[in-house]
Image: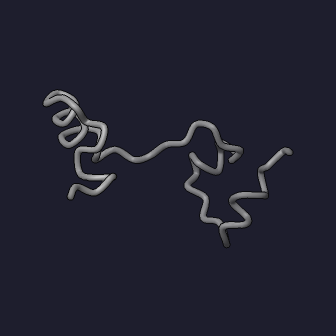
Amino acid sequence: MKNFIYKNFLLQTDTARELYHEHAKKQPIIDYHCHLDPAHIAGDRKFDNLGQIWLEGDLY
C-alpha cells in the first residue's frame, strides 16, 4: 500500500519530477507573507524564542 504522502506526491510528470528534485528541492523556503521586519530577515537576526518571532512584529 502506498503512503498518502510519498516522494513524488503531486509530481505527475517527468518534467515536474526533474524540476523539483534537481532544482527546487535544494532551495530555501521563503515565506513572503509574514510579519517580520525585512531588516531582521536581511540581517539574519537570531530570536530568543519562537514566541518572539511570532508576536514581536505582529501588527494585529
x%, y% of residue 12? 22, 32
- Left of 3 or right of it: where is 29? right
Which residue corresponds to the image point at 29% horizontal and 39% vertical from the top-left?
Answer: 24
Whether 8 is drawn above or below 50: the answer is above
Q: Please identify the quarter of the rendering in which residue 14 is found.
A: top left
- Viewer-proximal residue, 4 or 9? 4
Residue at the front extreme of this rendering: 1
- Viewer-proximal residue, 32 or 42? 32
Which quarter of the rendering shows the C terminus?
top right
Residue at the right extreme of this rendering: 60
- Viewer-proximal residue, 2 or 46? 2
Q: Please identify the quarter of the rendering in which residue 35 is found.
A: top right
x%, y% of residue 8? 23, 44
Which quarter of the rendering shows the N terminus?
bottom left
Residue at the left extreme of this rendering: 14
Which residue corresponds to the image point at 60% horizontal and 64% vertical from the top-left?
Answer: 46
x%, y% of residue 19? 21, 33
Badge count? 0
- Viewer-proximal residue, 52 or 25? 25
Q: Please identify the quarter of the rendering in which residue 51 is found.
A: bottom right
What is the image's colouring? Answer: one colour
Whether 1 is drawn above or below 21: the answer is below
Which residue corresponds to the image point at 58% horizontal and 51% vertical from the top-left?
Answer: 43
x%, y% of residue 42? 57, 46
Whether 3 is drawn above or below 13: the answer is below
- Left of 15 or right of it: where is 40? right
